Amino acid sequence: MSRSRKGVTITLQKAWLILVVTLLYVPIASVVLASLSDTRYMQFPHEVWTIEPYRQALASYTTITLHLTSFRIAFVVVLFSVIIATCSALAFARYEWRGRSLFRRLILLPIFFPQPVLGLALLLYFSALGITPDWRTAAFAHLIWIVPIVTLVISIRLYNYDVAQEEAAFDLGASRWQAFREVTLPVLLPGIVSGALFGFLMSWSNLPLSVFTSGADTTLPEWLFSRTATNYSPLVPAVAVIATAISGVVILIVGVAWKLATPQPTATE
Amino acid sequence: MSKSTSGLRLDAGTWFMLPAALLLIAGFLVPIIIVASYSLMPERSFELSADFSVTNYETAFAEGYWLPLAWSALGAFLTTAICLLLAWPTAKALDRFAGRWATIATLLIALPIFISESVRLFGLSLFMMPGGGILAGSINGIFGVSIGTVLNTQLAALIGLVYIHFPFVLFPLLLGFSQLPRDQVDAARDLGASPLQIFREIEVPLTAPGATIGVLLCFVLSLGANAEMSILGGQAVTVIARAIEQRFNYAQDWPLGAALTMLVIVLTALIVLPLLKRIDLDKLIQR
């Protein structure tokens, strides 16, 4: 009796998980389906299925500019966030110092902050300083939100770090820099790689900060946002699919490169 | 384990925190101070002066700007409640099937976080569109029945809010569940505890830190949410982020916009600060 009830619960739980995962992908599948037609108005099921919108999207100057703007921002964000967050992760999880527990709470605040409101506050701030917003101000806005996240990602790695290793290196006559490069950095590296990946993906897909802080420059998510409200054409879902596919390709490249670089897969927590 | 205080490295942490601290002072603290200062300036001024007053806050209430704030707060509250209801059984199931199967499911749930909000919300609107939308079109094609739509209503915006913020509740909650000692649950069950008792006396208290973080994140992020109402809600109501944007961009009234921004910031701080103070990060991250 109790055994069969347990079986029913397990089946229900499995069904629930399948339902949740399916529902999460319904909108994404919808974008893909919508992109496979060349009619001016959305009329599903399509009479003609075609990949024409993709050809148009890839040939269009606008699309390329959008990708370049988003890429430029994401590149700057990854570069700066990895450097800043590696330092702050060491302060967060590696060293004992006065004010550490305060620092740990303060650095989380931008994560627990409504992003559009942060974007609007920064918009007023830039205007008050007389700075004309463009892609660089957008990158700055992204950093405020992404540095704390990357700090957490790298810090998690450091929680399992044994300080004794570094001290042993000192005892064996290593300099500070040598100890860092030979002992600490290899431990941090997986965290830094996943932090960089996180940073790229979060910047690449960000809408709420870019929309208020990028000024005359337009990022991909911004363009998609404005074109979903007005001016629909199958080009819009096609660009959405391409932008998403690029995220996927980046994940794959980083994943494969990581696999190749580490001869034996170590357990990453 | 990570406790080592040799005099040599006492100040290393102070040095390492500097870049992030400077960034957040320049890009988070000072902007908030500037916004706070503008909120105390006379109407429509574009420069800061010593002319402090609270007129903008009075205007904000007199002109009914509490309404967008109330809509946003209501939306955030409903989103958080629904997400928690949906995330609880999901986290429990994922925790139970620990192994390859659950890892794949977890990854599949996590991936959409990295797809732009505009893409996902656009997808939802394509799905809900009346007539030739993915759902309506398919049903019409298969059954020959035309169905209505919820697109451009508050309900559609709420669906979008839940869809976007669900993972933010799920993952912290999952972290809570992963620390739940399974033998304790089994022991309670063997001793005859009912599922309700296990829920109330073991699961809820022990997953509370994770759940708190999830609830906080979800509430705060959906409080400022804007895109859901634009793309799915058809601006059926004005949310607070939209009201601020209108003050800044179209009305060119920085001080009133700043006052509205401060209202959101204060509300956020009132919710986040007391709860964040109580959470023990070490315990949550360290397995």
Image: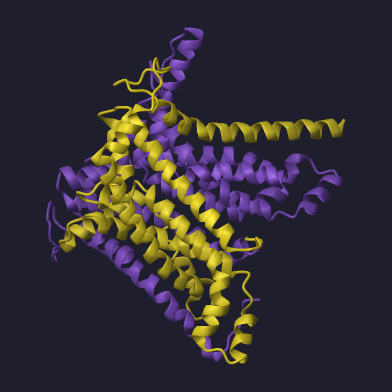
Chain colours: A yellow, B purple
Side of A198 relative to B61 (left or right): right
Task: Give the vertical position of B13 relative to A218 (above or below).
Answer: below
Task: Give the vertical position of A263 relative to A164 (above or below).
Answer: above
x then y, percent, for residue A78: 39, 61
Return the residue nearer the eye: A245 or B77. Answer: A245
Side of A176 relative to A236 (left or right): right
Res B53 → quadrant? bottom left
- Residue B40: tell me if it is visible: no
What residue is drawn where x is 38% and y is 25%? B151
Res A110 → quadrant? bottom left
x then y, percent, for residue A82: 43, 66
- Total numbered circles: 0
Identity of the residue furthest to the top in this view? B144
What residue is drawn where x is 73% and y is 40%? B196
x then y, percent, for residue A3: 86, 34
Q: Quadrant of the N terminus of chain A?
A: top right
Q: Quadrant of the C terminus of chain A?
A: bottom right
Side of A112 relative to A58 (left or right): right
x then y, percent, for residue B10: 51, 86
Side of B191 relative to A152 (left or right): right
Task: Give the vertical position of B88 relative to B39 (above or below).
Answer: above
Task: Give the vertical position of A99 relative to B151 (above or below).
Answer: below
Res B68 → quadrant? top left
Return the residue nearer the eye: B177 or A72. Answer: A72
Return the residue nearer the eye: B238 or A245. Answer: A245
What residue is drawn where x is 40% and y is 64%? A81
What residue is drawn where x is 21% and y is 41%? B63
- Residue B95: tell me if it is visible: yes
